[in-house]
Image: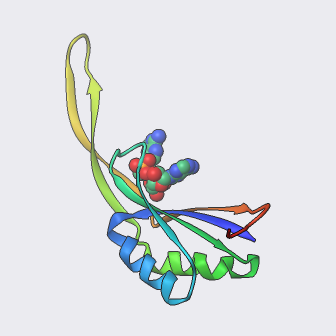
């Protein structure tokens, strides 16, 4: 068995959730925050059989879009002189970790 952790944009989370549950995957949704952009994203926890991992990844690929986001950045020009300018950062589609599960019990 595997545990899949998938971080997706909040904008895609509903589509991902609906697609996973439609295919009868059990998922838990966590409201999370990206450490770099400090903006909200969604982390899905999904435990499933090894052979179904590719199907989960395919669903994530289909429903999570790559997008670009402008973030403020700053540069220093000598002592005490700073300027701020936006830089483009590419976010997503999905960041996926697949972990081995040692034990799975429902009590
Ligand atoms: P954030 O940390 O807010 O990162 C958003 C996007 O900013 C990233 O997109 C990446 O393109 C860029 N970025 C992140 N850290 C950076 C840095 N130190 N310098 C320059 N650019 C940086 P994604 O790679 O698609 O990641 C989307 C979100 O997935 C991340 O949001 C974070 O919440 C999570 N994530 C990505 N890689 C991770 C990892 N190795 N471990 C844990 N969480 C991760």
42 to the left or right of 55: left
Count numbered badges in the picture: 0
Residue at point 68%, 70% (across, down): 106
- State the image quarter where residue 66 is shown: bottom left
Residue at point 73%, 67% (across, down): 104
- State the image quarter where residue 26 is shown: bottom right
- Residue 43 in the image: state x and y as whole percent: 48, 61
- Residue 84 in the image: state x and y as whole percent: 21, 33
Q: Is residue 83 above or below residue 5?
A: above
Residue at point 34%, 54% (across, down): 40
103 to the left or right of 29: right
102 to the left or right of 46: right
Q: Quadrant of the C terminus?
A: bottom right
Q: Is residue 34 above or below residue 7?
A: above
- Residue 56 in the image: state x and y as whole percent: 59, 78
- State the image quarter where residue 24 is shown: bottom right
Closer to the camera in the image, 77 or 101: 101
Farthest residue, direction front: 107
- Residue 22 in the image: state x and y as whole percent: 49, 89
């Amino acid at each position: 068995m595997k545990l899949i952790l998938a971080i997706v944009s909040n904008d895609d989370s509903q589509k991902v959730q609906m697609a996973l549950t439609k295919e009868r995957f059990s998922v838990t949704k966590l409201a999370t925050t990206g450490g770099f952009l400090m903006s909200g994203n969604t982390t899905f926890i999904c435990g499933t059989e090894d052979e179904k991992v590719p199907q989960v990844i395919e669903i994530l690929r289909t429903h999570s879009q790559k997008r670009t986001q402008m973030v403020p950045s700053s540069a220093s020009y000598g002592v005490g002189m700073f300027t701020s300018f936006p830089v483009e950062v590419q976010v997503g589609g999905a960041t996926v970790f697949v972990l081995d599960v040692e034990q799975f019990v429902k009590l």
